[in-house]
Image (tube, rainbow, N blue to C red):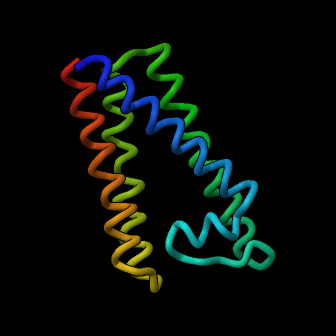
Amino acid sequence: MTVTAYTLAVVLDLFVVFIGARFLLQPGPAAVGYGVPADPKGDAAAYLTAKGLKDGTFGVMGLALLAFAGARAEAWFMLCVALVPLFDTLIVLRNGGTRAVAYGIHFATAVVVLISAALLFLV
């Protein structure tokens, strides 16, 4: 179970780093993938950049916690950070996004992050 818990945590952290990088390097397509398209050349540019930095930072922070503080610290981090995809679900639904994206991407991500937290607490 230890290998599974650590592997899932690392994969999730790296995935969030990837998402952050995508928002910084390809903000338009990243916003479409998020479920609420935004014009990276218009007023949304600052928000897309902020999202990219936030997501990238969360990923790096998760990796650092796992490497230097251990599974329990990472578990608490995952438990707290699961709020992000839960609220992303609501953001997509309230801003004209599809239910498929809201639940199939964001809510499902929250569930996987919570599973990761549970596995890390058991290590």
* Quadrant occupied by the N terminus: top left
Percent position (x, y) of residue 96?
45, 86
Asked if residue 16 lies left or right of residue 111, the reply is right
Residue toward you, 117 or 26: 26
Say if 79 sits above or below 7 in the image. below
Residue at 45% over, 34% down: 11
Looking at this rendering, what residue extends furthest in the left direction?
A: 122
Q: Is residue 52 left or right of residue 98?
A: right
Res 39 quadrant in image: bottom right
Q: In x, y percent, where is residue 110?
A: 32, 52
| Residue in view at x 69 percent, y 70 percent | 28
Q: Report the residue at 45% width, 80% height from top.
A: 97
The number of callouts visible is: 0
| Residue 72 lies in quadrant | top left
Q: Is residue 13 above or below residue 41?
A: above
Task: Tell me residue 89's x, y (percent).
Answer: 37, 67
Say which residue appears at 60% left-offset and 40% top-offset: 57
Q: Is residue 65 left or right of residue 106?
A: right
- Which quadrant would the C terminus be assigned to in this image? top left
Vertical placement of residue 88 versus 17, above or below:
below
Percent across and percent down for residue 113 are 33, 43
